[in-house]
């Protein structure tokens, strides 16, 4: 069970980091002509606990809206913090279980 909990948190943190990276790349290329934004799609990992994230390009070159990227970065930061809390809580639970067994 503990392995599942930690892998859920770790995969969530990796996905959030990927979202931050993609958004930072979008901001850096905001003035690049015909730039197609990077977007991260997430799906439940059926074979393991957690999520699987992949970076893709938008189909149309609509440009980058900086306000949209700011919101994406904030959301990804909150997702990272929430998944980090999952890992911390799992660690605390394992420590408590070890204390009870000892």
Image: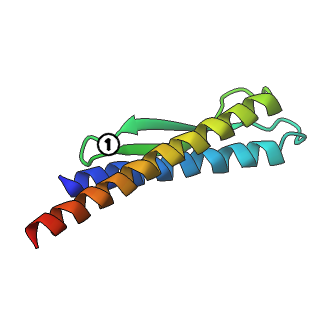
Q: Where is residue 38 in the image (x, y as percent from the top left)?
A: 66, 40
Q: Which residue is drawn at 26% across and 40% down?
A: 46
Could you say which quadrant of the image residue 99 lies in? bottom left
Name the residue furthest bottom: 102
Which part of the image, by quadrant, shows the C terminus? bottom left
Left or right of 12, for residue 57: right
Residue 101 image-quadrant placement: bottom left
**Picture residue at 30% right of the left edge, 59% below the top:** 92
Report helix, strand or loop for mark 1: loop
Q: Is residue 65 visible?
A: no
Q: How is the image coloured?
A: rainbow
Residue 25 on image: x %, y %: 74, 48
Asked if residue 45 is positioned above or below residue 92 in the image, the reply reads: above
Q: What residue did someone put label 1 on?
A: 45
At 73% across and 35% down in the image, what residue appears? Answer: 69
Residue 20 makes an appearance in the image: yes
Q: Is 73 displayed left or right of 87 in the figure?
A: right
Residue 35 x, y percent position in the rendering: 80, 38
Q: In the rendered view, would you say 22 is above or below 57? A: below
Q: Which of 73 and 54 is in front in this view?
A: 73
Give the residue drawn at x 24%, y 51%. 4
Instruction: Tell me if residue 60 comes above or below residue 94 in the rendering.
Output: above
Q: In this view, does 26 lie to the left or right of 92?
A: right
């Amino acid at each position: 069970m503990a392995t599942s909990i930690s892998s859920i948190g770790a995969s969530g943190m990796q996905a959030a980091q990927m979202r931050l990276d993609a958004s930072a790349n979008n901001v850096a290329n905001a003035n690049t002509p015909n730039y197609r934004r990077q977007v991260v799609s997430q799906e439940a990992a059926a074979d393991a606990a957690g999520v699987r994230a992949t970076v893709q390009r938008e189909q149309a070159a609509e440009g980058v809206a900086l306000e949209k990227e700011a919101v994406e970065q904030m959301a990804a930061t909150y997702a990272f913090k929430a998944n980090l809390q999952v890992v911390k809580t799992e660690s605390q639970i394992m420590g408590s279980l070890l204390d009870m067994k000892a």
